[in-house]
């Protein structure tokens, strides 16, 4: 069963034997008219909670309708002005035509007098003729005025045709009130997000084309939002560079981040190392420079609330990602909580994955993998599975996945468009269900496609 959706209305799909189900987050590219929030399949293959809706802030078709309505109003205002001008022109034209007849009649009389023999009268008329010659240049001006009047009438007819055409287009697109459409979309979004939160975790099956949010900073850095932030808290956190820096920028919203340089600066008590920082539940977790110490810094108190050494973890470019940059310890968050990705001598430099208690920073459990840390381009967690890229420059793909649920790994092939040719940070946000990336001085978002199975 499928109901198509016009601008601002709903579309719900159910009982569809689709192979994959989708999740998107972040703004859609301008050419896309829809945004897919979430979907799932049950054990019988029925697709439930599959949702397609206009983008969060404005429906693209409604935006065109609004622009069309504004254009129609402008044309109508122009038509009214033209109507007034046309009325004035018609009155002036009557005067001009009458004056033109009188001038020509007067000129004919002059010729008749000149041909007569009454010398005295002729001399008088010659004097008047001299004045007439001064008026003669007025005749072509009057002719031009008549031509302009004709253009005004033509313009009036064209404006009327355009008004009729715009009115027809408006009827075709639908005359829904913008505020009404926006209200419907927001109500639908709230319902769909509630549905999405009830979905089980999924397996990564695809990554969208990148969406560039901003171009700023150096070649290396990190940026993020808090997946546990309260409703209405859309702050963006920004950290330029990969070592020996202490200043974290706080932007009030994604819009402020994209359009302004207005930010609050927070000074950390110790510089960070790498780009593996994460903001989680109001605190930032980061690797202290030139150490294997993890620090939890509370933004509300501007104090360190906890710090702990990650035993045996390599640091100071011992077991970095393939791009270098002191990326030995990478902290990340998924639906299950806080994680640390690193390598140890005991595991021969291969990746170790540890689940951390976000309050105490103690290791809850660790998993060892067979993937060399230095051969990994970047890594991120989704639903308890670690995904690793084959590199950080050129052609990039996600090719290795380690599941903590089954303690098994597999090789996969999911293309990742590396638009700016140098990834130095790639992290998943479970609230947005999107990948945040720092790509050669560009802050980028990727939507992800997850395959959901409801048990």
Image (tube, helix red, strand yellow):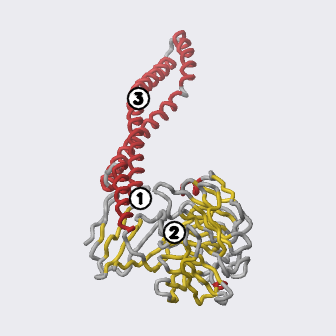
Percent coordinates x, y for residue 57 in the rendering: 44, 56
Residue holding disc 3:
88
Q: Nearer the viewer, residue 297 or 169?
A: 297
Percent coordinates x, y for residue 184 in the rendering: 33, 55
Q: CA distance from mark 2 to mark 3?
A: 66 Å
Image quarter of the C terminus: bottom left
* Viewer-side label of 3, 1: 1
Q: Secondary structure at mark 1?
A: helix
**410 relative to 93 in the view: left or right:** right
Residue 151 numbered mark, or none: none
Among the two numbered marks 3 and 1 on one chain, the one whose residue lies closer to the N terminus:
1
Q: CA distance from mark 1 to mark 2?
A: 26 Å
Q: Secondary structure at mark 3?
A: helix
Residue pictured at 51% horizontal, 71% vertical: 337
Q: Nearer the viewer, residue 305 or 438?
A: 305
Image quarter of the N terminus: bottom left
Residue holding disc 2:
429
* Viewer-side label of 2, 3: 2
How crowded is the residue under tag 3: few (<14 C-alpha within 10 Å), some, or many (20+)?
Answer: few
Quadrant in the picture for residue 59: bottom left
Percent coordinates x, y for residue 79 in the rendering: 39, 39
Residue holding disc 1:
60
Residue pictured at 62% horizontal, 83% vertical: 376
Among the two numbered marks 1 and 2 on one chain, the one whose residue lies closer to the N terminus:
1
Callout 3 touching callout 1 (CB < 8 Å)? no
Residue 268 in the image: above or below residue 411: above
**398 relative to 342 in the view: left or right:** left
């Amino acid at each position: 069963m499928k109901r198509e959706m016009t601008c601002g209305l709903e579309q719900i799909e159910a009982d569809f034997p689709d192979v994959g189900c989708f999740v998107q987050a972040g703004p859609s590219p301008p050419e896309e008219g829809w945004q897919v929030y979430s979907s799932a399949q049950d054990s019988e293959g029925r697709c439930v909670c599959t949702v397609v809706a206009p983008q969060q802030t404005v429906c693209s078709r409604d935006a065109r309708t609004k622009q069309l309505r504004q254009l129609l109003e402008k044309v109508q205002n122009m038509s009214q002005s033209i109507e007034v001008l046309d009325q004035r022109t018609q009155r002036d034209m009557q005067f001009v035509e009458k004056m033109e007849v009188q001038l020509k009649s007067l000129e004919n009389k002059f010729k008749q007098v000149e041909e007569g023999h009454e010398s005295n009268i002729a001399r008088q008329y010659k004097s008047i003729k001299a004045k007439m010659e001064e008026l003669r240049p007025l005749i072509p001006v009057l002719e031009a005025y008549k031509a302009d009047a004709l253009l005004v009438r033509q313009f009036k007819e064209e404006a009327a045709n355009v008004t009729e055409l715009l009115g027809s287009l408006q009827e075709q697109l639908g005359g829904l009130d913008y505020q009404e459409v926006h209200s419907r979309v927001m109500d639908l979004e709230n319902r769909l997000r509630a549905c999405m939160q009830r979905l089980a975790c999924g397996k990564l099956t695809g990554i969208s084309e990148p969406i560039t949010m901003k171009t700023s900073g150096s070649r290396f850095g990190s940026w993020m939002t808090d997946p546990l932030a309260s409703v209405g808290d859309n702050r963006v956190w920004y950290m330029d560079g990969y070592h020996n820096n202490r200043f974290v920028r706080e932007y009030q919203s994604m819009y402020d981040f994209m359009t302004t340089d207005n930010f609050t600066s927070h000074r950390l008590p110790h510089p960070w190392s790498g780009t593996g920082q994460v903001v989680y539940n109001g605190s930032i977790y980061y690797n202290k420079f030139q150490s294997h110490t993890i620090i939890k810094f509370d933004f509300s108190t501007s104090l360190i609330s906890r710090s702990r050494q990650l035993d045996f973890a390599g640091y100071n470019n011992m077991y970095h990602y393939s791009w270098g940059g002191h990326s030995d310890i990478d902290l990340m968050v998924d639906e299950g909580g806080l994680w640390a990705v690193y390598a140890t001598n005991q595991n021969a430099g291969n990746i170790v994955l540890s689940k951390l208690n976000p309050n105490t920073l103690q290791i809850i459990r660790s998993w060892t993998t067979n993937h060399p840390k230095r051969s990994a381009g970047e890594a991120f967690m989704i639903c308890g599975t670690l995904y690793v890229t084959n590199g950080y420059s050129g052609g990039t793909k996600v090719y290795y996945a380690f599941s903590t649920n089954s303690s098994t790994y597999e090789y996969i092939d999911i293309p990742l468009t590396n638009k700016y040719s140098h990834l130095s940070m790639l992290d998943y946000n479970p609230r947005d269900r999107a990948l945040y990336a720092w790509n050669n001085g560009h802050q980028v978002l990727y939507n992800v496609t997850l395959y959901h199975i409801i048990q």
